Image (cartoon, rainbow, N blue to C red):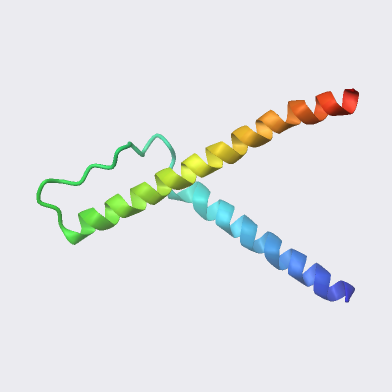
């Protein structure tokens, strides 16, 4: 029973670390601009690039939201702990 719990935890940790490593290597916020611009005569590759950039922007927004929520939670937790 204990082995199964450890195995599942290790698997979840490995997946999370892989996702973070992939996200860190894809694109930084300096490379992305919103809104995503598609040329006037787009090719299939232009549509794929626009789709990928839009997804990266959405992911960056979600990460920023989670980070801001966590940053705001810390003072609340400390204030609640100190009474």
Report whether 21 appears left or right of 41. right
Q: Position of residue 59 (x, y in %)?
A: 47, 47
Point out the residue furthest to the left here. Answer: 41
Please give the name of the residue rendered at 19% of the width and 61% of the height, measured from the top-left corner: 44
Q: Is residue 74 left or right of residue 62?
A: right
Is 16 above or below relative to 73?
below
> Where 37 falls versus 22 (above or below)?
above
Res. 81 image quadrant: top right
Give how far across and how far down residue 57 sits, in percent: 41, 43
**Image quarter in which the C terminus is found:** top right
Q: Residue 69: percent from the left, percent from the top?
A: 64, 35
Indicate the quadrant containing the N terminus: top left, top right, bottom left or bottom right.
bottom right
Which quarter of the picture shows residue 73? top right
Figure disc tally: 0
Closer-to-camera residue (79/12): 79
Residue 60 placement (x, y as % from top left):
48, 42
Task: Please name the residue shown 59% across and 59% down the image.
Answer: 18
Q: Residue at x 75, y 25 (%)?
A: 75
Task: Give left or right: position of 55 versus 11.
Answer: left
């Amino acid at each position: 029973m204990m082995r199964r719990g450890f195995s599942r935890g290790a698997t979840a940790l490995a997946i999370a670390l892989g996702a973070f490593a992939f996200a860190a290597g894809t694109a930084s916020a300096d490379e992305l601009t919103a809104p995503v611009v598609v040329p006037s005569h787009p090719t299939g590759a232009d549509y794929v690039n626009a789709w990928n950039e839009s997804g990266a922007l959405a992911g960056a927004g979600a990460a920023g939201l989670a980070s801001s929520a966590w940053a705001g939670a810390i003072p609340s937790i400390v204030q609640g702990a100190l009474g």
